[in-house]
Amino acid sequence: MSDSAPCVPDVTDITDDDITHDDTANRTGNAPARTSLLLPALAALGAVTLWGLSFPAMKVAVQALGPMPLMWARMMVAMALLAPFTARLFPSRTVAVAPSGALVRRGFWSGVPRRHKLLLLPTVLLQPCLYFLFESNAMQLTTASQAGVISASVPLLVGAGAWLFLGERPSPRLWVGVVFSCAGVAWLTLSGGAGTESAPDPLLGNLLELLAMACAAGNMVLVRRLSAHGGHGTFRWNPWTLTALQTMAGALFFAPGAYATLTGMGQWPADVVLAVVYLGAGASLGAFGLFNWATSHLPASSVGAFINLVPVTAVGFGWLWLGETLNATQMLAAAVVMVGVALGTGRRQ
């Protein structure tokens, strides 16, 4: 897999020798070049920008369709875009040369180690399935401000998970950055402003939002383990293949919304159609693909800090698209979040 761009590579061109060479280079103890970390950081930044833009798009679409039909529709859009790349995302492999000289090939799944198959189920179940289920219900019960404060827990949860399950040792600088970014998100989301929705049951809503953030953090740690360079063994997942599997799992999970989508889509207004297409192509496929790619190249604890930019981009796009007010206090809070992300994702000694 090339480090030059977050594209879908031809996985058939990746051999065990290539992967072993990458692993050897990673074991030399030399610090990665700054340029090699720039593209993954930009990919993570692009992902959170796409996610931030999804908030106003979601607001338009969910009011017209409801949560389950919307989620199924956006997953189907993403699947339609992935369909032409199926052979490259799930390639067969050469395993032997027959006496006749012909190559003997097996399907993609025959080459996946058993322990990887066991990790796939919790990976796709955590995100997008449970994540979207918890968050869509949480937003109906609590305020956006309280949910935003809870979303700041993601870097802490990712750092703890990477420390417990991946053996990563977050530096003091990263924890200082997490503190700054969490404080900025809390300040941003508690700074008020017009458009806050009613909260019929904030306690339950906050609990569901926390569960959603735990699902997101667990998914990041699992994706890092499945697709990281220099992992154990010679098998390494293409992050875009993981994205395809997540999309298919989401389509199955939210299938109860299929009937309402198929029977009513002919009457959708143009803005709803555009919102659904964006949510499927940009927020689901594009954002998850970019973020999975970034996670495969950066420590999970560092890439998780980018999540705190999602509320900042959401407020910004809400201001640009929906005319929501971005006051001076919110702008200062956004600056604090960016300082925290810069600290948390900066080069470590």
Image (spheres, helix red, strand yellow):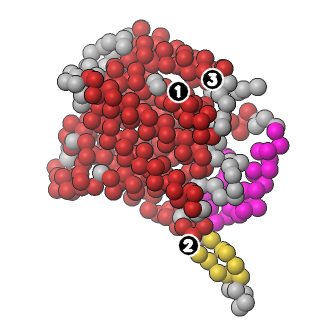
Q: Which residue is mark 1?
A: 156
- Residue 181, position in %: x, y? 52, 19
Task: Using the image, tell me which numbered label, if any, was put on residue 21.
Answer: none
Q: Secondary structure at mark 2?
A: loop
Q: Point out which mark residue 174 bears.
A: 3
Query: Is residue 152 shown left or right of residue 68?
Result: right
Is residue 161 placed above or below 129 in the rendered structure?
above
Q: Dot 1, crowdedness within 10 Å: few (<14), some or many (≥20)?
A: some
Q: Are marks 2 and 1 in contact (CB under 8 Å)?
A: no
Image position of 65 with respect to 19: above or below: above
Q: Residues within 10 Å of mark 2 (few under 14, many from 20)?
A: few
Residue 107's label in the rendered image is 2
The Cα atoms of the two marked residues, 2 and 1, are separated by 39 Å
- Mark 2 or 1, closer to the camera: 1
Q: Is residue 93 magenta?
A: no
Q: Quadrant of residue 205?
A: top left
Q: Amino acid at mark 2?
A: Gly
In three-dimensional space, the C-alpha distance between marks 3 and 1, rounded to whole angstroms, equals: 10 Å
- Please name the amino acid that badge 1 sits on: Leu
Q: Secondary structure at mark 1?
A: helix
Q: Residue at x 52, y 36 (%)?
A: 46
Res. 304 visible in picture: no
Mark nearer the viewer, 3 or 1: 1
* Residue at position x 49%, y 64% in the image: 86
The boundaries of the magenta stretch are 1-29
Distance (Cα) linking label 3 and label 2: 42 Å
Decide which of 193, 205 is in the foreground and name it.
205
The number of numbered badges drawn on the structure is: 3
Q: Tell me, yes or no, whether the two marked residues, 3 and 1, touch with CB atoms within 8 Å.
A: no
Image coordinates for residue 6, horizontal then vertical, percent = 59, 47
User: For this rendering, which residue is in front, 78 or 166?
Assistant: 166
